[in-house]
Image: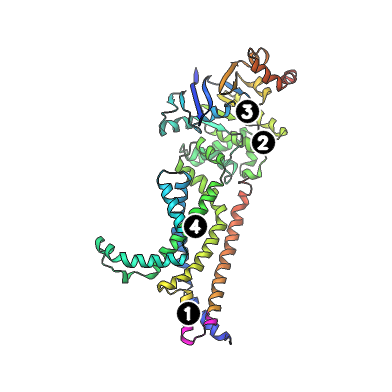
């Protein structure tokens, strides 16, 4: 089996055009997952009746399902139910008009929500009870306590896990090609289909993913260090 | 004038009765010290007054607010919290905020005082506890005694009608206890109304207007420091104090 550097570089060029697609899918999913994950973690932290057990149940179920199945399931379910739903809401679009990137984002958002809710739950639980007492005693409301005390304390602790999740999301986004999204991985495969040079294409894809994740890890380390300097001893 | 009237506070955790009917009247400017062995309910009593724990029954009159613990609404709880301030055994400064930010947090957010004015109050309070030069330090950069002094400044800044101290020196190295007690003494002489749970007998003897000895969720004995320390009527109080070898302290005083 020969390896053509030239073909690899060509695949690299073709695939890197789709870096923005991959990043878009990963970051938007992380953002959506961050919002819902935090809400779920807070509901469970404050043990809000009914809602708390519902979330616990859903998360237990979804946590055990491979991301491939979540992507395919999201695709299947939305292809079945989108048209009737759109019709009943009076939208003038059908499933064919939906950008498949939306489906990928939806699926990865579910993954991000589950993971982030668990990450936030753990970090919120690690905050000492005394910090809540102090917040209450100076007169902060629950909402003010969450915004001014809990989130700023929890975020630096959660950061390494969040950046890990972002790396996982970027890698998982390669599965979006299964629902016909053209991302880095899909683009490389398409270019390989023209000349059957799959090895070169896969190496190119690996290099791009590796470079992206290397950058993410480095910037997260940098952010972590600057945040932790003042928090060094906060979780004794 | 009675600043605070607390009547018949009961509190249980599960089947474990912690407080079995505590009454306490504090006049404006008075310092009340609560003594007692661990597990006697002193800390729980203090936490009930700040609504950090919800008492099962009883009531509190503080200034013009009269609140029944069991039925208190969110608004009433907040009203009491805004009139009281607590100093904790473990300091409990907000770890992600500087000393000054810790002190002004309770002014800017819950009490809606303008930031600049709050900062002026904050610096004045840090000055009172001798921490002006550490205003920009984070708690992790301060010693235990310094953290507790910031904790006291944070409570003072709220200008509370009633200050609650929950064993403020118990977590400190022996050589750091003095600076915190000095700060509290100055507050007492300034005329602050304070309830102090403490094991510092000498502080209680010198500073308190009224001393309460608690055990097993009831008040065993109350009186002036002289009555409690020198002419105690209850055997239990005598036994507790003798074990702390108070005699050696009296000589110093």
Q: Position of residue A153 (x, y in %)?
A: 55, 48
Q: What residue did someone put label 4 on?
A: A115
User: Label 3 vs label 2: CA separation?
Assistant: 22 Å
Q: What residue did someone put label 3 on?
A: B38
| Mark with earlier residue (3, 2) | 3
Label 3 with label 2: CB-CB less than 8 Å? no
Q: Return the chain for callout 2.
A: B
> Mark 2: few, some, or many residues within 10 Å (few <14, many ≥20)?
many
Of marks 2 and 1, the one in the foreground: 1
A10 to A77, vertically: above or below: below
Q: What residue did someone put label 1 on?
A: A189
Magenta residue check for B69: no
Tell me if I can see residue B159 in this picture.
no
What is the quadrant of the C terminus of chain B in the image?
Answer: top right
| Mark with earlier residue (1, 4) | 4
Question: Residue visible at 47% across and 57% down?
Answer: A114
Callout 1 secondary element: helix
Relative depth, front residue between A60 and A21: A60
Relative depth, front residue between B23 and A50: A50
> Mark 3: few, some, or many residues within 10 Å (few <14, many ≥20)?
few
Question: Residue visible at 59% across and 64% down?
Answer: A218
Q: In this view, does B106 lie to the left or right of B126?
A: left
Q: Return the chain for callout 1.
A: A
The span shown in magenta is A187-201
User: Label 2 vs label 4: CA separation?
Assistant: 41 Å
Q: Do labels 3 and 1 share a chain?
A: no
A221 to B192, vertically: above or below: below
Q: Position of residue A118 (x, y in %)?
A: 50, 53
Q: What residue did someone put label 2 on?
A: B145
């Amino acid at each position: 089996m020969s390896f053509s550097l030239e073909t690899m570089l060509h695949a690299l060029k073709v695939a890197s055009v789709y870096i923005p697609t991959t990043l878009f899918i990963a970051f938007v999913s992380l953002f959506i997952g961050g919002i819902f994950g935090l809400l779920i973690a807070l509901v469970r932290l404050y043990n809000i009746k009914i809602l708390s057990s519902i979330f616990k149940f859903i998360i237990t179920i979804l946590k055990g399902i491979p991301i491939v199945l979540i992507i395919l399931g999201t695709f299947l379910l939305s292809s079945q139910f989108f048209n009737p739903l759109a019709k009943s809401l009076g939208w003038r679009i059908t499933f064919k008009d939906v950008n498949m990137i939306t489906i990928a984002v939806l699926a990865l958002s579910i993954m991000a929500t589950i993971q982030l809710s668990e990450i936030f739950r753990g970090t919120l639980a690690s905050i000492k009870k005394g910090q809540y007492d102090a917040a209450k005693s100076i007169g902060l409301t629950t909402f003010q306590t969450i915004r001014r005390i809990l989130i700023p304390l929890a975020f630096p602790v959660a950061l390494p896990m969040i950046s890990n999740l972002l790396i996982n999301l970027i890698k998982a986004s390669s599965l979006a090609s299964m629902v016909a999204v053209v991302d880095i991985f899909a683009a490389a495969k398409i270019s390989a289909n023209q000349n059957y040079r799959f090895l070169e294409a896969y190496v190119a894809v690996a290099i791009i993913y590796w470079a992206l994740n290397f950058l993410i890890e480095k910037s997260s380390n940098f952010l972590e260090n600057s945040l932790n300097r003042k928090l060094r001893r906060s979780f004794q | 004038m009675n600043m605070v009237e607390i009547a018949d506070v009961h509190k249980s955790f599960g089947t474990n009765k912690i407080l079995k009917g505590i009454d306490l009247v504090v006049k404006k400017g008075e310092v009340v010290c609560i003594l007692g062995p661990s597990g006697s309910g002193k800390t729980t009593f203090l936490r009930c007054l700040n609504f950090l724990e919800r008492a099962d029954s009883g009531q509190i009159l503080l200034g013009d607010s009269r609140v029944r613990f069991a039925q208190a609404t969110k608004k009433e709880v907040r009203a009491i919290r805004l009139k009281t301030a607590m100093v904790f055994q473990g300091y409990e400064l907000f770890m992600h905020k500087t000393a000054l930010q810790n002190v002004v947090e309770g002014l800017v957010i819950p009490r809606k005082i303008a930031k600049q004015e709050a900062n002026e109050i904050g610096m004045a309070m840090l000055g009172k506890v001798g921490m002006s030069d550490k205003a920009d330090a984070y708690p992790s950069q301060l010693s235990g005694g310094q953290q507790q002094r910031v904790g006291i400044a944070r409570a003072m800044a709220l200008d509370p009608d009633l200050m609650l101290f929950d064993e403020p020196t118990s977590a400190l190295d022996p050589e750091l206890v003095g600076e915190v007690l000095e700060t509290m003494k100055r507050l007492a002489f300034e005329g602050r109304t304070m309830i102090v749970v403490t094991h510092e007998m000498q502080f209680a003897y010198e500073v308190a207007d009224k001393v309460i000895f608690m055990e097993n969720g009831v008040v065993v004995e109350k009186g002036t420091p002289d009555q409690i320390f020198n002419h105690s009527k209850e055997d239990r109080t005598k036994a507790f104090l003798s074990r702390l070898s108070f005699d050696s302290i009296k000589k110093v005083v």
